[in-house]
Amino acid sequence: MPAVPRGFEPCASLLDERLAAGGHGDMVRWQAALSPLPALRATRVDLGATITAEGTASATERRRLEAALAQLHPWRKGPFHLFGVTIDAEWRSDWKWARVLPHLASLEGHRVLDVGCGNGYFGWRMLEAGAREVVGVDPTLVFCMQHRAIAGYLDARANHVLPLRFEEVPPGLRFDSVFSMGVIYHRRDPAEHAKRLFRHTRPGGQVVLESLVVEGAEPLRPRGRYARMRNVWLVPDPATLCGWLERAGFCDVRTVDVGATRVDEQRATAWMRFESLAAALDPDRPGRTVEGHPAPLRAVVVGRKRVYSRDGDADRGAREAT
């Protein structure tokens, strides 16, 4: 088990339990996939659009590396390029980051919380942008195993991916920046999710909330699936998304980007062989999902927490934990 980030020591036994051989039915297979990873040393690391580790690797080592990483299917976030092996993930996550980055306050020196971080792709981009440490939480264990496979080659210990639900983050922790991208529409109580984001943001810190949205004045409450996804409880309009953050206590809340998700941004690949966005869209009705809902739009909303916020006493008492 890698070192537990500062402030997460109360979670140590829970983390050990989830990453133990019996923590998931596939855990033994995933751990076996990590065992044959070749001991390669990167001579160049690039945390740009394609997360890259380059160095000398024989053809045999590249085959071993590719075979091991393939055992950690499905790769949802990327791209990565490791010693000649390109992981073409389902999402072109670099495109999303390009939409988000111009609207951020500087991440220089920030300790960041990334809620629903997946395999940690965005954490590497946050480090590139100047963050001193990123702690990502995501309960999907295969994503944590993907991160463990990658992190050893990038020679960086400041990007953590922990198999935790957001609700399990120790309550006293505050972060300079808090990100929640692609999460809130999976929450039964999105307003409570926004409040939790507020509680984990330090006074003066920023929040970044990215979500599916619909146009118009009313959120969408799907009956059954949305774009073939389970557990989509509510797809807000941008004004509702901003309202959740404002009622939670954030100020200067604004929508900075809205755009349709394209099939060349989210698609099936050799590294994610399940159905993707194209299979979720109605081929006969452009702009609709197979269930008849509006096709996916995504919005990015940003805000900040006042230096003297309405939960000031709790915030001031928690500054040492940031």
Image: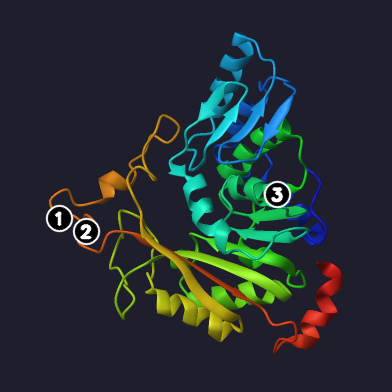
Name the image colouring.
rainbow
Which element is circle 1 on? loop
Q: CA distance from mark 1 to mark 3?
A: 41 Å
User: Marks 3 and 2, how far apart in space?
Assistant: 37 Å
Q: Residues within 10 Å of mark 1 (few under 14, many from 20)?
A: few
Q: Which residue is mark 3?
A: 127
| Residue type for callout 3 | Leu
Residue 133 lies, in percent from the top left, at 76, 53
Between discs 1 and 3, the one toward the N terminus: 3
Q: Nearer the viewer, residue 32 or 59?
A: 59
Quadrant assignment for the N terminus = top right
Q: Which residue is painted at 68% across and 44% down in the image? A: 19
Residue 33's quadrant in the figure? top right
The image's mark for residue 129 is none
Q: Position of residue 64 (x, y in %)?
A: 60, 17
Residue at 76%, 87% (x, y): give it: 312
Residue 316, horizontal then vertical, whole percent:
82, 81
To which residue does mark 2 refer?
288
Q: Using the image, determine if residue 255 lies above or below residue 79.
A: below
Badge number at residue 285: 1
Q: Residues within 10 Å of mark 3 (few under 14, many from 20)?
A: many
Residue 58's x, y, as percent?
Answer: 64, 10
Residue 130 is left or right of residue 299, and the answer is right
Distance Cα–Cα, label 1 vs label 2:
6 Å
Q: Is residue 134 above or below residue 87?
A: below
Position above or below: 231 against 16 = below
